[in-house]
Image (cartoon, rainbow, N blue to C red):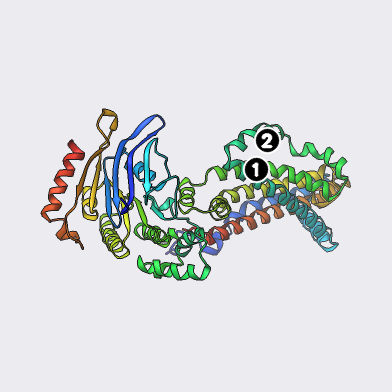
Amino acid sequence: MHAHLDPSPPPRLARLRPAVFPVLVLGLLEAWARTIGHGSDAIAPPTAAIEALAGAMRDGSLLRGTAFTLGAAALGLVLGSLPGIAIGTVLGLSRRATAASFLSVELFRPIPSVALIPLAMLAFGFGLGMEVSVVAFATFWPMLILSQAAARQVEPGWLEVARALQLGRADRLTKVVLPAMVPRLFVALRLGVAIALVVAVTVEIAANPNGMGYAMMIAQQSLEPALMLAWLFWIGVVGYAVNAATLAMQRRVAARMGEVSK
Amino acid sequence: MTDKVLEFEQVAIRLGGREILSPTSLAVGHGEFVCVIGPSGCGKTTLLRAAAGFVTPSGGTVRRNGRAVTGPSREVAFVFQDYGRALLPWRTVRGNVSLALEAARAEPLARAARIEQVLRTVGLSDHCDRFPAQLSGGMQQRVQIARCLAQQPTLMMMDEPFGALDAMTREALQDELARLAAEQGLTVMFVTHDLEEAIYLGDRVIALRASPSHGQPSLAAILDVPIPRPRSQLETKEHPDFLRLRRELYRYLGHA
């Protein structure tokens, strides 16, 4: 009579299932923007946004903005996390250093990084230096706190092995302590990457006339909702890609460091 | 006494205000295999750690080759009970053994040859590029023993090294260790809570009591094990001396 019903849908269709909801939302948005919401200053049809994105891609503004924001975020992250990891490691290894630095850390750490924009603007003017400095400040603290915890939580057994083998100070640091910290440092790095990107875009929206955040602001101020939405979408894509890249790097390093994957 | 590798002279240890070990004197001769046994909390691991220089006794002195022990030394190899916390998981088998040689600043060429040699000794030549997590518990403990052998120690301190392994693996490793110690002329101090393991492996067994706080000294007995070597799991454990010692030790430890 009737055909045999397969309990599970064919795999290729099943893989599309997570896309159903976003596509539905986009379709509704498109319909709404083309009918009731026609001429809105905030919402443009998704197709118009895609067109605007393609336009930004063609004239090079997309590449320029993305490169500036990513470059500033990366540079700030490096400048913030290298001293953060170094100082955090020292503090984590020495109780005396922790006690001595406690007040300074607790005084400076709670300052919201974006509150430093005026100061950074005075010191560096508009441009890369100011954005990098704010990103560096914002990423320095979490990197410091997390590497401090990472250094403190190094398996005592491994430190005892270093003692038993009479490993020198430098060897102990580079061959035992730092490798032991790597998994926790990656957690810190993933957090740092997210913070760097958010702060970079925030600085561009608030003050710096460069990058993706500024381009989105300009699109909004010149009443181009399609272009603004295109940038918003693109910032999401970039954030996703950066996070995926960090995750991939973390997995590679973990595999090289003997972590057996399931 | 120059043939004594290790001498304990009225060694007492207090940790955090609690007496762990009451004044204890004993000596370990060159090439001797001494097992230390006692219920948990009796201070047997602490005694071993004091001998290795990890813990400073609160009273008395530990002497190694006639000199007072002030800290760890590369001459003393320490096999930790928990291999998971003793092997570096990010280093391969080869890398873990190499660490001992890197610490001793051995030449890279000599290092590679020495690693091959000790891994062959413990039967891990085929696994040198694997990570600890890819190995069984018994194999991981073998890696730790290989790392200790690479140190070319005069003294091997072992803290319940086979305690976490299953019975079959444990017996196999006991036989391997006995063979190694005989071949290499190692002096071994071996802590265990397993009576049979202590008698099977030891030339002498040192029995410690649970709590020195009741006025009794930590040292309960020192017993010679006159069973000839090489020993075997089946015959040795049926040897009249084995049974006698087992009975005696049981009395000392369980119901003294």
CB atoms of marks 2 and 1 within 8 Å: yes
Q: Position of residue B54 (x, y in %)?
A: 43, 44
**Label disc, if present, on residue A105 of the rendered structure:** 2
Residue B76 against residue A206 in the figure, above or below: below
Outermost residue toward the left?
A: B240
Which quadrant of the rendered structure holds the N terminus of chain A? bottom left
Q: Nearer the viewer, residue A225 or A61?
A: A61
Circle 1 sits in a helix, a strand or a loop, which is it? helix
For label 1, the residue is A144
Chain of the residue where label 2 is placed in the rendered structure: A
From the viewer's perspective, tell me whether residue B134 is left or right of residue A242: left
Tell me what residue is drawn at x 30 percent, y 65 percent. B183
Outermost residue toward the front?
A: B1
Q: Position of residue A120 (x, y in %)?
A: 83, 41
Residue B162 in view (yes/no): no
The 10 Å Cα crowd at callout 2, few under 14, some 14 to 19, many 20 or more, is some
Q: Nearer the viewer, residue A46 or B117?
A: B117
Are labels 2 and 1 assigned to the same chain? yes
From the viewer's perspective, tell me whether residue A15 is left or right of residue B246: right
Q: Nearer the viewer, residue A250 or A30?
A: A250
Tell me what residue is drawn at x 56 percent, y 62 percent. A13
Chain of the residue where label 1 is placed in the rendered structure: A
Q: Position of residue A228 (x, y in %)?
A: 81, 49
Tell me what residue is drawn at x 40 percent, y 61 percent. B152
Q: Position of residue B132 (x, y in %)?
A: 43, 59
Nearer the N terminus, badge 2 or badge 1?
2
**Among the 4 quarters of the image, the one containing residue A98:** top right
Residue type at mark 2: give it: Val
